[in-house]
Each structure stands twice: as C-alpha cells, then as structure tokens.
Amino acid sequence: MNNFGRIFRLSIFGESHGKGVGITIDGCPAGIPLTEEDLMQDLGRRKSGARGTTPRIEKDLPAILSGTFEGKTTGAPIIILFRNKNTQSKDYSNLLDSPRPGHADFVAQHKFGKNNDYTGGGHFSGRITLGIVAAGVVAKKILGDVSIDAKLTEIGGRTDFDAAIEEALLEHDSIGGIVECKANNLPIGYGEPFFDSVESMISHLIFAIPATKGIEFGSGFEAAKMKGSEHNDNFIDETGKTETNHAGGINGGITNGNELVFRVAIKPTSSIGKTQNTMNFAKGKVEELLIEGRHDACIALRIPVIIEAAAAIALADLKLIDQARR
C-alpha cells in the first residue's frame, strides 16, 4: 500500500493529525553526505505561509533516526520523522457522518470502516508528502549532476497568480494549477521498458501526490493533433541531441539525453469556504455542509518541490537499476 521502488525503496507513514509523519528509505548507497540541515531548503519550499496557502503552520523539522553516521549514509535504512504540533482535530468532528465532497472521506470510511483516521484527512492528507520531499533530497544526491526544476506555469487557468489567488480568496473558493518539471544532464539509457519505463515510474509517484489529476510528457496531448513529420524530433549531432523535443527526452521509455519535460495538472483544493451539499449518513438525507478548519486556496502553490522530489526518486531508482545491470 505505501511502498515504492525496486532498489531505492520507500515506505511512507503517518497521519495529518497523528503523532507524526515520515518515511523509511532503503537501498540508499553508503557514503552520501546527509544531515537534517540538507533537507531544510526543499522542506521550506513546501511550507505554508504564502498568500493562498493554509494558515496551519508546522515547523516541519526533520529528525533522522537511523541510516547515517557522522553525517554520511551507512547503507542501512534511513528513517526520517516529522512530529505534528499544530493540530485542531475538533474542526473535523462532523465529517464522520457528513463526508466532504471531493475528498477521500467517503471512500476511506468504506475501505477501512470506523477505524479510519479522518482528522485533517488522516493518511490521505497532503501533509504526508513531507516524506516524499525528504526522500527527494536524498535522491537528488544520488543523481549527482542531474538538475531538476519544477515551476507553476498557471493557476486557475491564468498566468497572473496574484489576481487568481485574490479572486479565489474573495469568493471563499479554491483553484488548481499546472506545474511543469524539467530535468537536465540525464545520461542516455535510464528506463526499464515496458512496465518500468521512465514515464511509468515518474507517473506512479506523481499520482501518489494528493490533488494530481493528470500528467503529460513532451508535447503530451498536443501530439494527438500533430503529424508524424511534425512530431518527430530530428537528430542534429552524434550525441543524440534533437532539433525539437516533442518526445520530452524519452524514447521507448528510455532517456535519450535531451531535456526531460513533463507537466502535471493539480485540481482545486476540495475543502472550500462555500456551503456545499453532502449526504448525512447518520440521518440518511442530503444536508448543507460548511467546512471548518485551515485549508489551501491553491494547493498547487506548494506542489512544485514535491513534483521535483517524485521525479528525482524515480530517476534515482532507475539509475541504480541501470548500474546493477552493468
């Protein structure tokens, strides 16, 4: 349920309002410099506090419990823990009988029964992505000179971010966004077709990020409108560099040495300040629901670093798989 990877293996744990969240990383090579301080920059990029993000502020201080010695990885499993401090579980007391539209409340209760922790979204919360970001820092170290950069290109269908956020806040609503991720300096040959192609591995992790609704590589869905003569990337030198990059740096599920490019669609946050209708299962009738608590008007603002981490984790695993074969 909560594991990923063939060599660089992850196991994620925790709940939004539980004692803490975190991740166990197995298969990390020994000798990689790693301290809590190394994690702070990317964790800071994920934090709330900016206009349009949740008022819930957590320190998000990582504690590396195992897998390092004198500032370097030992080769043993790495456990990274983040303790929850700022929780207000009472804000969710009405959700057991009245699930929020768009959330996992309804399906989680059906799957796990009354044992499911619904406070703050429980194990389905975006807070769980702290562990993914931490693992992404380790993965980036494994990848060495590979650079990965993800940025928002639009929110709410607009490029004027400030105006889009202010409008959503004024309407007590939420908006989604598009994040574009690029990876450079990748060697030719990463990827294990068919089932562990580069696209498959990255997509697997991207869809583990709450609020993800779609992904496309290279020209993506626009490719369906193109002719082969337009979409084919012509080679221009002996290194494999191409004139265009409609393939997004991948052919046959394998990196081709060009820039890897993909885009991710992030849906609007489901918890909004507008009254919605939902089924009250205790009463057996539809009622109005006004969601309390602290939520992001645009969760996409905090997601680029998580997408970078997901790409790094997938590519690090593929690198280690490729090295094992050779």
Image (cartoon, rainbow, N blue to C red):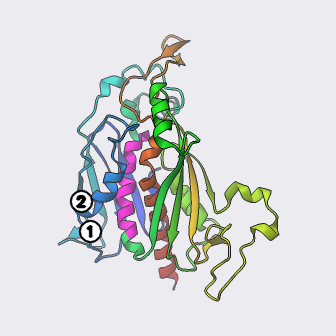
147 relative to 128, above or below: below
Residue 290 in picture, x, y percent from top left:
45, 18
Residue 47 in picture, x, y percent from top left:
33, 46
Q: Nearer the viewer, mark 2 or mark 1?
A: 1
Q: Residue furthest bottom?
A: 238
Q: Is residue 94 on the magenta stretch?
A: no
The disc placed on residue 34 is 1
Pointer 2 with pointer 1, Cβ within 8 A: yes
- Please give the range of residues in magenta: 124-140
Q: Is residue 125 on the magenta stretch?
A: yes
286 relative to 14, above or below: above
Q: Quarter of the image holding residue 240?
A: bottom right
Q: Is residue 203 left or right of residue 302?
A: right
Mark count: 2
The answer to whether one can see residue 27 in this image is: no
The disc placed on residue 64 is 2
211 relative to 68, above or below: above
- The residue depicted at 28 percent of the width and 44 percent of the height is 20
